[in-house]
Image: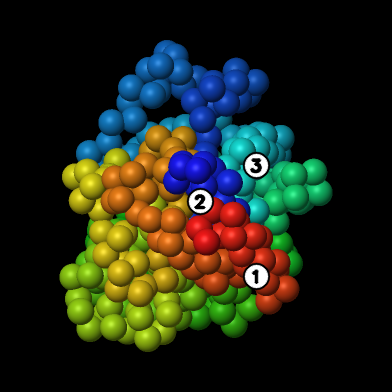
Amino acid sequence: MSIEDAIRALPKVELHLHIEGSLEPELMFALAERNQVELPFASVEEVRAAYDFSDLQSFLDIYYAGAQVLLEEQDFYDMTWAYLERCRADKVRHTEIFFDPQTHTDRGVPFDTVIRGITRALDDGREQLGISSELILCFLRHLSAEAAMATLEQALPWKERIIGVGLDSSEKGHPPEKFQAVFDRARAEGFLTVAHAGEEGPPEYIEQALDLLKVKRIDHGVRCLEDPLLVRRLQKERMPLTVCPLSNVKLCVFDTLEEHNLKTLLDANLCATINSDDPAYFGGYIGQNFLETAEALKLGLDDIETLARNAVEASFLDDDGKQDLMIQIDDWAERYVH
């Protein structure tokens, strides 16, 4: 059997997925028509042609423009359901998705509208597709800490549906320390914490996320290798890194996929995982990330197995949920690896 067959059959866990970044151009246009929203693009083809990003900010400009079509609860449901159907095709058994409420509340869309649509789809995904899930609220770091605190207040009535908070958007010039008080409050309210760090930003941002935000995972984290002391700390603490290979190349963090450092992270015994980030914009969902990365970096089936087990270990599933997924990977490994 080929490694491609093995990857397609692999039970997967996704830990770094922005649900707004799964909005495909076709659905974007359908929602624009339904909600009578005028897009700055004439066609689906024109949208795809615009997906030629030079950096994170050029991506975010288009990302926020596309989000304008999301207005009603059903819009958020349809977007989330479309992603879950992709999960089914990619053998994703568990996903922990990010959502950016400020992207919508700043446009006048109520927080409750956003989360009702997303959680209704996640509930249906659990019942109809057998895909378990968790929801993580991300603060937009280019906005103020005060705005993040106000968003946290809006989230409190939904604590049973939101497992954690995170930090995303433009990394440059917005260090984690800016949001320390917000994360302190979030942890006091019982939320787990994660943060984007070490993608555009320096290794110091990873240290701040660990020391000041007390995160359980580092999203991206690929620049950790620039600091050997930090690498040793990440090894010792078994701190997960939710790496997004195709995204990293699309945003010019690496010039080519062959130059990506994921294999080096694995060889350093770091808890690295593979994820898709914003797949509608970056050219591939999690299965495609596995396939293209395995080919570019010449990963073996043992590497693929390690990545899958790392994701289970790094997830926010309870012990029973993790054990169940590990057994599924055991069965896969028995067939494809051993």
Q: Nearer the viewer, residue 210 or 64?
A: 210
Q: Residues within 10 Å of mark 3 (few under 14, many from 20)?
A: some
Instruction: Return the x and y of residue 334 as percentages of the image width and height.
Output: 59, 60
* Residue at the right extreme, as displayed: 127
The reply to whether residue 156 is visible in this rendering is no
Q: Helix or strand or loop: what does disc 2 sit on?
A: strand
Q: Helix or strand or loop: what does disc 3 sit on?
A: helix
Instruction: Return the x and y of residue 290 as percentages of the image width and height.
Output: 43, 48
Horizontal arrangement in the rendering, residue 101 relative to residue 155 (left or right): left
* Residue at the top extreme, as displayed: 42
Q: CA distance from mark 2 to mark 1?
A: 19 Å
The mark total stands at: 3
The reply to whether residue 249 is visible in this rendering is yes
Q: 272 above or below 83?
A: below
- Which residue is tagged 1? 322
Amino acid bearing label 1: Lys
